[in-house]
Image: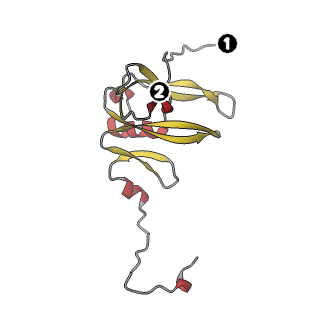
């Protein structure tokens, strides 16, 4: 059987519940894919994207698994090479969520000039500030003319 050398980041993972009140952080290592505790439908391990991070107000450097919204925001802000994500001041936003029925606290890392919004399907996205209106405002929303009375019978639902 053939084996491949694997490199993993050693150290403690940060919990979202430990970050209440923390507002800033910096990534201090490259982000690398690593096997997670979860598996795909075929039984193979799912990967998680892990890097080292330092939070303002905490002395210790932690491991963090970056979610897709955070990765997409970092790619948009700094490019697709995770080397370029290092030593940038990032906003920290936490959100209580349920994962497989268990309450967790999700961590979002947000570049300066960006914000976390919900897209049309309700998924979190990190986008440039002011872009939310463009994402969540379809052009086909009818404008109601308040000058004319609307008959309730004319409303289709």
Helix, strand or loop status at disc 2:
strand
x%, y% of residue 58? 38, 23
Q: Is residue 82 above or below residue 128?
A: above
x%, y% of residue 21? 40, 35
Q: Residues within 10 Å of mark 2 (few under 14, many from 20)?
A: many
Residue 64 disc label: 2
Left or right for 151, reference 56: right
Q: Which residue is mark 1?
A: 1
The picture quadrant where one finds residue 144 is bottom left
Residue at left offset 54%, top offset 80%: 155
Residue at left offset 49%, top offset 55%: 120
Helix, strand or loop status at disc 1:
loop
Q: Nearer the viewer, residue 1 or 142?
A: 142
Q: Is residue 151 above or below residue 96?
A: below
x%, y% of residue 149? 44, 87
Q: Is residue 49 above or below residue 150?
A: above
């Amino acid at each position: 059987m053939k084996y491949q050398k694997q490199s993993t980041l050693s150290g403690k993972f940060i919990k979202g519940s430990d970050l209440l009140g923390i507002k800033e952080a910096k990534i201090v290592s490259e982000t690398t894919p690593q096997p997670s505790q979860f598996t795909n439908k075929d039984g193979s391990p799912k990967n998680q994207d892990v890097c080292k991070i330092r939070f303002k107000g905490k002395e210790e450097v932690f491991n963090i698994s970056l979610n897709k919204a955070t990765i997409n925001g970092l790619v948009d802000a700094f490019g697709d090479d995770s080397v370029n994500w290092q030593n940038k001041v990032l906003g920290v936003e936490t959100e209580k969520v349920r994962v497989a029925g268990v309450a967790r606290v999700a961590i979002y890392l947000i570049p300066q000039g960006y914000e976390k919004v919900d897209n049309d399907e309700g998924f979190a996205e990190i986008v440039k500030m002011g872009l939310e209106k463009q994402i969540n405002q379809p052009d086909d929303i009818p404008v109601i003319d308040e000058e004319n009375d609307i008959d309730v019978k004319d409303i289709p639902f």
